[in-house]
Image: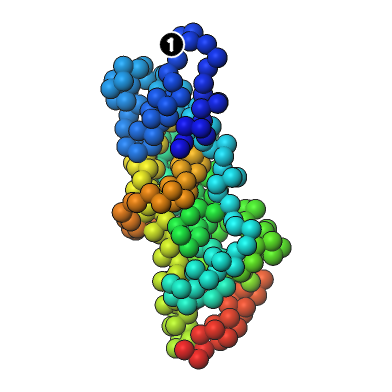
Amino acid sequence: MLCPLVEETLLKPSNRGLPLLPIHQLLVTLRYYATGNFQLVSGDLLGISQPTISRIIKRVSETIASNLRQYVRFPEDSHGNMLKFYTYRQFPNVSSCIDGTHIPIKNPGGNIGEVFRNRKRIFSINVQVACGPNLEIMDIVARYPGSMHDNTIFARSVLRIRYENRKIPGVILGDNGYGNTQFLFTPVLNPRTRAEENYNRAHKGTRNIIERCFGVWKGRFLCLREGLTTNLQTSVTIICATAVLHNIALLENEDFEEDPEVDPINDILIENDAGNGVAHRNAFILTHFGNN
């Protein structure tokens, strides 16, 4: 199924230099995604030099990632997603769950190297993902260094603007690394009423979907968990390409055992009130959880 997606771009018009067929280039790249093995190992198995393997991975990744807007997007009608989210823990009006996950990379070096070192002292890209009720990736931002705060990434994102302007209906659920707004709700840090406890319980059960999404995504593509050894731009391209493949696998009903991400790098917990967000959340709690 993937071959038609990449074949036209990868097929060379002549046999000069004995180029690999598109199917072989695709399989080489998928092997790297699935294992995260050193490119030299893959090259030895196939009798191909490491530089050639590197060029193949870059070329195939760019081709797959070019389909990002086709496969990684919000549905035209988000109300179906809201109904599916509601079936988990009866949390109303949710159209997506959001979180950041750190993808390890090699030290980019130069003047920007240390910016990519996160709080666990490893080099990473902090990738923001908004997912749907079927674990699908609906929005991804994969350009910020590991030292960047989740809330800062969201504040700079097009996703925030789309929710703010009501281009996407409903609300987002995030953890306490984010600030409360009129469209992004976080848990109550110190619940004092039964309604707040009910809200937190429903929030946690529903937002668990984003952790499951990360678990399946990184479990299927171990290079994201083991660490990317490519240069910075190619690493960003690989992250986007695997997001496309993750959604394609879901569309094709490819079975994969879930392995939720455990102990992610949590940001500093905050109760940030952005534009009367806490007051808006409190009113929401009273309306929907006050009588439970």
Element at label 1: loop
Query: Could you say which is closer to the camera, residue 267 or residue 133?
Result: 133
Left or right of 57: which side holds 111? right
The answer to whether residue 209 of the structure is visible from this angle is yes
Q: Quadrant of residue 194?
A: bottom left
Q: Residues within 10 Å of mark 1 (few under 14, many from 20)?
A: few
Write the residue at 51% across / 24% down.
Answer: 10
**The N terminus sits in image quarter:** top left
In the orientation shown, which residue stands out farthest toward the bottom?
Answer: 291
Q: Mark 1 belongs to which amino acid?
A: Leu
At 50% across and 44% down in the image, what residue appears? Answer: 244
Relative to 202, say whether 262 is above or below: above
Q: Residue at x 65, y 53 (%)?
A: 158
Give the image location of residue 154, x and y in percent: 58, 56
Q: Residue furthest top?
A: 16
Give the quarter of the image for residue 138: bottom right
Label 1, on which residue? Answer: 18
